Image (cartoon, coloured by chain):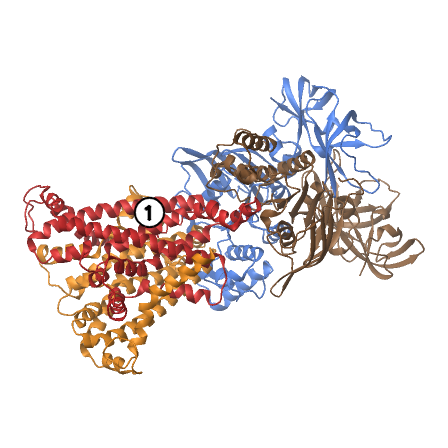
Chain colours: A orange, B red, C blue, D brown
Amino acid sequence: MKGLRIYALAYLLFLYAPILLLPLFAFNNSTIIAFPLSGFTFGWFVELWETPALHAAVKNSLLIAVATAVFSTLLGICAARAGAKYEFPLKRPILGLIMVPLVLPEIIVGVSLLIVVVQLLDWQLSTWTIVAAHTLICTPFSIAILNGAFQNVDTSLEEAALDLGETPLSTFRLITLPLVMPGVISSLLISFTISLDEFIIAFFLTGSDPTMPVYIWGLLRFPQKLPAVMALGTLLVLLSIILLSIAEYFRRRGVRRAGLKDTGGFL
Amino acid sequence: MKGLRIYALAYLLFLYAPILLLPLFAFNNSTIIAFPLSGFTFGWFVELWETPALHAAVKNSLLIAVATAVFSTLLGICAARAGAKYEFPLKRPILGLIMVPLVLPEIIVGVSLLIVVVQLLDWQLSTWTIVAAHTLICTPFSIAILNGAFQNVDTSLEEAALDLGETPLSTFRLITLPLVMPGVISSLLISFTISLDEFIIAFFLTGSDPTMPVYIWGLLRFPQKLPAVMALGTLLVLLSIILLSIAEYFRRRGVRRAGLKDTGGFL
Amino acid sequence: MSTPNAPPLIQLSDVDKYYGDYHALRSVTLDIEQGEFFSLLGPSGCGKTTLLRTIAGFEDASSGVLMLGGENMKGVPANKRPTNMVFQSYAIFPHLNVFENVAFGLRKKGLSATEKDTKVRDALAMVGLDGYGDRAAHALSGGQRQRVALARALVLQPKVLLLDEPLSALDKKMREQMQTELRRLQRQVGITFILVTHDQEEALIMSDRIAVMFEGEIAQVAAPQTLYRRPASQKIANFIGVMNFMPATATPAGGVVNVDIAGLGIATLDADQCPGGVPNGAAHVGIRPEMMSLLFYGETSTASVAQGVIEEQSYYGDMTYYDVRLEGVSDPVTLSMKNIVGRPVLERGEAARVSWDPRALVLFGN
Amino acid sequence: MSTPNAPPLIQLSDVDKYYGDYHALRSVTLDIEQGEFFSLLGPSGCGKTTLLRTIAGFEDASSGVLMLGGENMKGVPANKRPTNMVFQSYAIFPHLNVFENVAFGLRKKGLSATEKDTKVRDALAMVGLDGYGDRAAHALSGGQRQRVALARALVLQPKVLLLDEPLSALDKKMREQMQTELRRLQRQVGITFILVTHDQEEALIMSDRIAVMFEGEIAQVAAPQTLYRRPASQKIANFIGVMNFMPATATPAGGVVNVDIAGLGIATLDADQCPGGVPNGAAHVGIRPEMMSLLFYGETSTASVAQGVIEEQSYYGDMTYYDVRLEGVSDPVTLSMKNIVGRPVLERGEAARVSWDPRALVLFGN
């Protein structure tokens, strides 16, 4: 067992090396990505800061990610609440089918969306078509997360609120919603991240305003832009770590509030 | 609440329409994707069947997906077991950092891998570089799933086996492994699916043998190939539903075996 | 207790409840008086919680009438009924502190902040939680949660307080303490309490009256001492404590019943020793363990006496339980002796003389 | 029980256990004999489970010596010790059926399939589960799981069977049944049983000897009747059942002790009524509720008598507990009466005469 463990650790290090190299070359004073390192610089970050096209792409990506997070979380709340509270015919299969985009190749989703939007509906491609597409792929994650959150709410808490004179609506507002809030925040963060990172659908559906991954794709034609990409990547790693920490914080708080044992699951 | 629910349902239907349209046009007897439908045909499926390049891409994708599933699950077992059984300094942060690729844009992962492999290590791009890259993005999922599985194993079961005369190794083989098996199968299926669907990393790292999503990307240059893509998409939707059902089956079996309440979480 | 001619606070007539095919309540008819401490006692799945939830308004009766304070409750939702509930899980709102939990039901009462504050403070004082208002819900022990749940319900001064196995999650010492406190509280506030429990001891100690339920039906409604001494059937006798049963032949003879107990001879019982009706022919007599005694070294008794051998002995500290095989009786009988100073504890295999008073016998039809 | 001159099967000398700064076992010294039914009794967190797990080999003692069957167990892992354990959760392997669970420990014994089959069958018969071999683990009830766990441990014929609160997950009726069965089983197989429990009643009924533990230390080791009648401290007396304490002044006088009990006068006690040592000066006398009696209508007593008023009454069916405020005594005393035929149950507020035998008193230093 011991040998296997060391081997696994070494393999993990090897796997993660590319990510560890991002900051290394982001601060390296050379346009060529190669060892030995030639000196320390903030230059690539300054270059990022001084590129208006990147700013536009980032702003666009953020707008899409926020909208996607809100929409898919709202849909997730409706679906999860329906799943937790009501029995209806074919409930299991319907809730199952909602999960399909979770495992479908995004290139297929992208192509069929493109066909629907452009060829069948004859709409203009815009930021909102990307939002719709991202909502499609994020909703299954939101539902999965919120399902867990709603199932963890003890029904007797809702009954107690009714018993104390609240209506079903005010019970939802005063009791249910605060209790599933950690799940809601998790769902928002994860949809946000997925949308922010997604490339291929955005590539197909993007109109005149590229998202950040699409913009990066464009940069890759110019080798001298690589260090800037590394700098951008470093920022994204940092952002990822922050988002993960926030998500984990809320997950744990949710577990603690619901009085459950922490089983250490991540999502 | 009622009105909101109906609205949510309508919106969900609208969102999922593109996926429902896939089979519609896959069986439509026309190269043009438009209503009205012009007749029923199996032709596009036959065309898929008669394209050797697609066969090669599918075979390549399957090989990569299987290898990725096995490697990331093995790594996941090691990491999850270490997380569940041992206390070590900085345990939480280390296990957290392993999750970073989960939220990193794949285009960034793809670029930095490309740089490492080609520019720094000067390796040939091959199927195995894609396997390494896919293992990198799948390992966090495997760890998340297997973490849950290992934490659900009641420590007293392992102690009981020791108490009845087994060594730690045979206890792992006879007790722990069978009990986390549903988690292992889940992890295999999910890594398999992620690898099979992944486009951008495969696109960067692909050598002479494209994977299926990369092959589809290539097809998109030819509008007359679109119905074949729809047919392929239909097959993938079917495959997805089957994989999801298997994963859900094993998840439920795992929950039942561990004697836990089904909280309906998906992953 | 209410004045004798006041109408019952709660009246259930022929209440049935189905879940699909499952018949959870079978034509329940029951009156509960103003100010009573009433218990619903039965094994799990007997319908006692369903009955409580029907009174609370969480379940609708499939048929039958439920009157509460003279009003038909048909179609009245839980939030409009003058009942409040203490849930088995206590249902303390985890995101609110103790004060906010107790004040929750006062939201819509249109009280000033000062009035609200006074009411909550009084309710907390009543359950012995003065000064706990700022405590977070998750920082409470089991006993404290239960007190918060009580205060939260009582602060609304309901006509009926419903308690769904409120003590089952507590450990033994805490449970005994809360039993005493609940009784005291009920005497103090004078509100009707309806307690659901599967613990016969708890029901005996706390209640003014007890309804025993089996399989959705009410088997007997009586005061604790009546229920224990004169159970209407063998099933009830077995559920409420322990009873020895012996086959017998009954012959009613004007006012009294002559009983021939297999192996132990003839006894004459009063009609009131047949709470389930006077049987004729094959029957069973029952006797509680504490109603039989071991006779030690030369002690004599004016009561009936039989010879036997001790088959099993369990020393509980305050009591010793013996299983004694009596000559001529097929099954061993269980009896209990208080362990007082100077009284020895007999061991397995020792000979024993057992005495009992025929007035302690209860007669059941087969 | 072993022959008198055999060495103890288990010897613990000065065993300490630390978890970081937490001192879980404090210099535990204890001998357990071959064939004994021994209980470790104490509140949760007292170290009883840690002690059991140290004997099983799941924990290493931080210092001290553990001898088992004459061999030092230092460094011997759990799988090499002649002990088997029944876990609190039963730890039934969920992916194996009943037969496979019971046969699990026989894997490495080099038995033929027939021998294995016979052994498993015998073990299942012993715990009353004949014919359950093919049953899946998840299809078992709580009581059945516990029996499978017993069979799985006993089939290996260990020198010591360790039981970690094996009955705490069962309901009351099932628990009482399993208590009887466990005792019978232990007499039948003659193996040393070590039972961990927080339930004093369970320990009293089942054990040959009991070790009471508080905060990692052993407070008293004694047979059940000695422990109950002569507890070495007020803390032990309170943990094992209920005891009334009254302040008193003790004056030793050659062999006996004269005690002046506040409000109740003088009594003379034997030295053996001071199990924790003979105090001199300020002390407390203790008396169990069952050692006091109410005197009814003109009954007389040769024992000590005091006047009082009933402050609280709890009717348990077989017994009634009274809290009586005695004249001149600060706190009410609790006493219990067996409910026999013709004896009334007094209500709150009634006057009462209470009698007790001074031989029932126990004297504790302050």
Please give left or right for residue A70 compared with residue C347 in the image: left
Quadrant that contains the C terminus of chain A:
bottom left
In the rendered view, would you say B185 is above or below D135?
below
Q: Nearer the viewer, residue D258 or D44?
A: D44
In the displayed structure, D151 sits above or below A17; it is: above
Q: Picture quarter containing residue B133?
A: bottom left
Q: Position of residue A215 (x, y in %)?
A: 19, 70
Residue at screen point 44% across, 49% down:
C81
Q: Where in the figure is residue C53, as x and y percent of width and height?
A: 46, 44
Would residue D38 be found to the left or right of residue A148 on screen?
right
Residue for point 28% across, 59% down: B134
Q: Position of residue C306 (x, y in %)?
A: 78, 24
Above or below, C310 relative to D53: above
Q: Position of residue A202 (x, y in %)?
A: 19, 63
- Using residue A180 as the reference point, say whether residue D222 is left or right of it: right
Of B31 and D152, nearer the camera is: D152
Give residue C66's quadrant in the image. Answer: top left
Q: Amino acid at mark 1?
A: Ala
SS state under label 1: helix
* Residue position for label 1: B247
Residue drawn at 59 percent across, 52 percent down: D58
Taking depth in this image into account, of D302 and A108 the one nearest to the observer is A108
D304 or B109: nearer the viewer:
B109
Q: Residues within 10 Å of mark 1 (few under 14, many from 20)?
A: many
Q: Is residue B87 visible?
A: yes
Q: Residue visible at 91% across and 58% down?
A: D252
Q: Is residue D241 visible?
A: no
